[in-house]
Image (cartoon, rainbow, N blue to C red):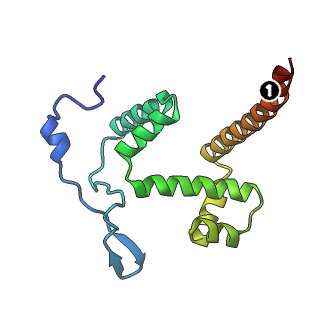
Amino acid sequence: MSILPNEFTSRERNYKEIRILTVRNSPGNVQSPPQDMAKRSSQQLEKTFEEQLHRSLFQVLADLSNTHDAEGFSSSFFTSTEVSIFARRLAIAVLLEQGKSYEGIRSLLRVSTATISSVAEQMKTPGFVLALRKLKVESWAEKWSEKLLRIFGKKIKEE
């Protein structure tokens, strides 16, 4: 299934000019973004087409069935910096949920308190809630798996 209209040729898809958005730190102070920061064209797509692109991306993400596939996808579509940003944001949420201090998180993950505050504000959103729930379930299953192996491993060895 092609998600791009037929009128787009391979060459147009691959070589279309992308304008770099500037990052404004403060009024009158304009800087170019870092080289590995995601760039977005200033030209807007038609809304339903952009929604179709998003649905296609989300379907691909939903179809990733294991960590090997997820790592392969991530390394192909995201820079190492972008993956690190996502991983740190998730780690911040986990540490905040565990009651860790901003200073402890800042020191451990080398992130700003502004980033920690941003994650703290977003922790009630569906994406963070889902991610944290999945991590809790995985952690719980891992702990019980180890306990059951110790219990049943001893009984199997005794018999």
Q: Position of residue 24 (x, y in %)?
A: 39, 73
- Hey, which quadrant is residue 129 in on the image? top right
Residue appearing at x 66%, y 66% in the figure: 105
Vertical relation: 52 (above or below) 118? above
Q: Secondary structure at mark 1?
A: helix
| Quadrant (top left, top right, bottom left, bottom right) of the C terminus | top right
Residue appearing at x 33%, y 36% in the figure: 49
Q: Is residue 50 left or right of residue 148?
A: left
The image shows a total of numbered marks equal to 1
| Residue placed furthest toward the top | 159
Between 113 and 81, the one lying in front of the other is 81
| Residue placed furthest toward the bottom | 28
Between 146 and 74, the one lying in front of the other is 146
Between 149 and 154, the one lying in front of the other is 154
Q: Position of residue 135 (x, y in %)?
A: 67, 42
Q: Position of residue 69 (x, y in %)?
A: 45, 33
The amino acid beneath tag 1 is Gly
Q: Which residue in the structure is indicated by mark 1? A: 153
Q: Is residue 68 left or right of residue 12?
A: right
Between 118 and 145, the one lying in front of the other is 145
Vertical relation: 153 (above or below) 35? above
Q: Position of residue 3 (x, y in %)?
A: 30, 30
